[in-house]
């Protein structure tokens, strides 16, 4: 039976486990804030032959030896227990105002199960969310009710029904396409990229059709990646490519970084990631969305990303796609040369 695409409301930090070939010693490192550890994988040139899920780190593509799917449970009105005593509830509502200095948002929210009736309240939010939220915006989020302290909102996502329907429909189509391709899900050089729809760093829906007639560079990163040799290096090289392409009169280039970790990388988190690095987002988009869509894009682009407990393991790949949507070049790892990519781009 065809695995159902997870609806956007079914994001979960839990990841599907898949085995990967790994015969060399791994070197762990730790995330500063979360204590999450990241491990190196040996680089291999072969693309994955099965559908990958979530991973993080290595120079090149790796074969998967197992294929597993899981569906997240729909949010419940029952609180999720936390080790520190905090309780979590799914919340939907409309943003009435934002106080960026105090990092609070006033939200007219719907009833929160049996916990709270519909009302208007001020909630604490992160700096990233305080900067990104807009008055009048419909949102969904996790309401965190601490044992002691003020209520706050986390994992804030746009909740516009029209946009959500577009993203969910594209995720279902992508899920079906990946399933139908089976062990041939991986797209070789010369093949066209799949259709998709995700949210960018400004919470706008970005459909793949937007890039028709453009040259596209695509890579996969996650914002909490602690290894400077991996995602940070890849992002810096994308920025260098952006600059070199302009100097070379490449006028139709779009750069796209898709998150490996959509459970954490909300549009606001991606927006902050770009802002603190002074990234010019006029033609550089950071995308996130349903976990199922990210997983299927990883499979079709030959990128591996997998959580093993708190350890995120992934490969890195950067692709160049021409104006007709065909993959024309691919570099695995983070040691690629921006000049090599610019040299392959068409000039105006």
Image (spheres, rainbow, N blue to C red):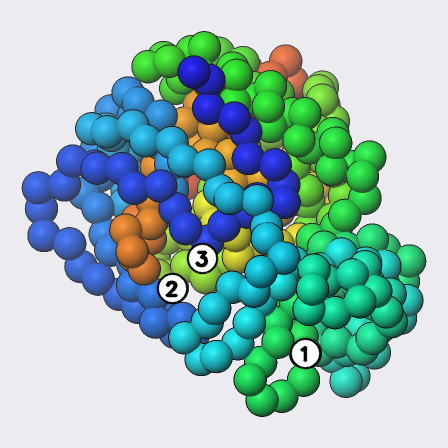
Q: Is residue 246 above or below residue 310?
A: above
The residue that appears at 47% across and 28% down in the rendered structure is 296
Which quadrant would the C terminus be assigned to in this image?
Answer: top right
Q: Which residue is mark 1?
A: 151
Q: Mark 3: which secondary structure?
A: helix
Q: Alpha carbon of mark 3 to alpha carbon of mark 2: how far?
A: 8 Å
Residue 170 can be seen, yes or no? yes
Per the image, the residue denoted by label 3 is 232
The residue closer to the viewer here, 210 or 12, is 12
Q: From where the camera sits, is residue 235 visible?
A: no
Query: How far separated are the C-alphas under marks 1 and 3?
Result: 33 Å
Name the residue tied to disc 2: 226
Q: How many marks?
A: 3
Viewer-side residue, 93 vs 292: 93
Seen from the viewer's position, the closer of residues 316 and 115 is: 115
Where's residue 38, x and y in %? 29, 59
Instruction: Check disc 1: other Cα within 10 Å, few if <14, some if 14-19, many if 20+.
Output: some
In the image, is 253 to the left or to the right of 261?
right
Picture residue at 52% right of the left edge, 26% below the top: 4
């Amino acid at each position: 039976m065809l695995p159902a695409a997870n609806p956007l409301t079914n994001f979960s930090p839990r990841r599907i486990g898949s085995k990967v070939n790994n015969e060399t010693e791994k070197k762990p490192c730790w995330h500063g804030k979360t204590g999450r550890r990241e491990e190196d994988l040996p680089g291999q040139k072969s693309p994955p032959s099965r559908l990958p899920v979530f991973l993080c780190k290595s120079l090149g593509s790796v074969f998967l030896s197992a294929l597993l799917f899981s569906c997240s449970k729909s949010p419940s009105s029952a609180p999720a227990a936390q080790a520190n005593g905090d309780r979590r509830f799914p919340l939907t509502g409309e943003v009435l105002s934002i106080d960026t200095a105090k990092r609070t948002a006033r939200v007219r929210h719907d009833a929160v199960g049996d916990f709270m009736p519909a009302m208007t309240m001020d909630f604490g939010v992160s700096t990233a969310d305080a900067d990104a939220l807009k008055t009048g915006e419909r949102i969904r989020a996790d309401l965190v009710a601490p044992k002691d302290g003020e209520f706050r909102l986390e994992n804030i996502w746009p909740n516009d029904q029209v946009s959500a329907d577009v993203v969910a429909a594209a995720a279902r189509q992508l899920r079906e396409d990946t399933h139908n391709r089976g062990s041939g899900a991986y797209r070789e050089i010369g093949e066209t990229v799949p259709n998709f729809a995700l949210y960018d760093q400004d919470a706008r829906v970005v459909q793949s059709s937007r890039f028709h007639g453009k040259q596209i560079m695509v890579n996969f990163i996650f914002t909490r990646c602690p290894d400077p040799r991996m995602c940070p290096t890849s992002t810096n090289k994308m920025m260098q490519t952006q600059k070199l392409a302009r100097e070379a009169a490449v006028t139709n280039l779009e750069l796209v970084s898709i998150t490996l970790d959509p459970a954490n990388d909300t549009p606001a988190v991606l927006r902050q990631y770009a802002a603190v690095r002074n990234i010019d987002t006029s033609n550089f988009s950071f995308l996130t969305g349903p976990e199922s869509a990210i997983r299927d894009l990883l499979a079709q682009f030959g990128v591996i990303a997998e959580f093993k407990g708190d350890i995120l393991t992934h490969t890195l790949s950067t692709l160049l796609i021409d104006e007709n949507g065909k993959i024309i070049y691919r570099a695995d790892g983070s040691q690629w040369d921006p000049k090599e990519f610019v040299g392959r781009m068409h000039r105006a």
